[in-house]
Image (spheres, helix red, strand yellow):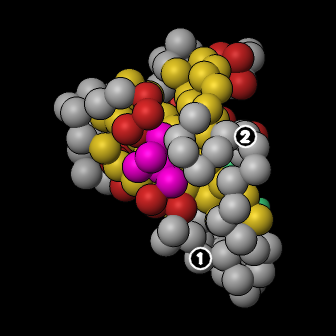
């Protein structure tokens, strides 16, 4: 699974976003060590706080199916699903990623509808991650 393919998978996942309140549609594609890809989208709620981000949907799908080691993540988002630039993961999602992913794991921020993007490591996005070990 290469970077471009994972990015295009995230774009496809974004189409399932349920975002009637913010209008921001987000997609994520998480590559497990097994080779399996777990997709996610944001799912909003009328009560607002139960809203879950695309990245956490993908992580929780993976972990709940037995996968705990990951190779790469692609994230994409934009107002009404229009991709106009990078859509970096929120702080809560960064913390959830730090629970399961290595600090040097690449995170692709998809920047356009063709799947072009920029790559960062998790530790670039979340330096000094909180850990209990
Ligand atoms: N959102 C994500 O899906 N991922 C993030 O990392 C940041 C924000 C979603 C949550 C909400 O549905 C919408 O984007 C606007 O905040």
Considering the image in quadrants, where does the C terminus appear? top right
Counting from the top left corner in percent of width and height, residue 119 is at: 60, 22
| Front-lying residue, 50 or 71 | 71
Q: CA distance from mark 2 to mark 1?
A: 20 Å
Which residue is at a point 53% across and 13% down the rendered structure image? 104
Counting from the top left corner in percent of width and height, residue 29 is at: 44, 45
| Front-lying residue, 33 or 83 | 83
Q: Is residue 66 above or below residue 33?
A: below
Q: Determine the secondary structure under disc 2.
A: loop
Q: Name the quadrant containing residue 5.
A: top left
Which residue is at a point 25% across and 51% down the rendered structure image? 65
Counting from the top left corner in percent of width and height, residue 61 is at: 37, 55
Quick one: which residue is furthest to the front in this view? 114
- Asked if residue 52 shows in the view, the reply is no
Which residue is at a point 52% across and 21% down the rendered structure image? 106
Mark 1 highlights which residue?
A: 18
Counting from the top left corner in percent of width and height, residue 86 is at: 72, 40
Q: Name the quadrant containing residue 33.
A: top left
Q: Earlier in the sequence, mark 2 or mark 1?
A: 1
Which dot marks residue 86?
Answer: 2
- Asked if residue 66 shows in the view, the reply is yes
Look at the magenta stretch and give its main secondary structure: helix
Q: Is residue 64 above or below residue 34?
A: below
Which dot marks residue 114?
Answer: none
In the image, the segment drawn in magenta is 7-11
Mark 2 or mark 1, which is nearer to you?
2
């Amino acid at each position: 699974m290469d970077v471009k393919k994972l990015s295009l998978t995230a774009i496809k996942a974004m189409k399932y976003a349920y975002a009637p309140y913010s209008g921001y549609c987000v997609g994520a594609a998480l590559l497990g060590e097994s080779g399996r890809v777990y997709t996610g989208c944001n799912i909003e709620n009328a009560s607002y706080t139960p809203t879950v981000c695309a990245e956490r949907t993908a992580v929780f799908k993976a972990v709940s199916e037995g996968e705990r080691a990951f190779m790469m993540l692609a994230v994409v988002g934009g107002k009404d699903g229009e991709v106009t630039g990078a859509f970096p993961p929120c702080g809560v999602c960064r913390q959830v990623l730090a629970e399961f992913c290595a600090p040097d794991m690449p995170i692709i921020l998809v920047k356009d509808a063709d799947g072009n993007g920029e790559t960062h490591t998790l530790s670039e996005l979340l330096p000094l991650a909180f850990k209990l070990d």
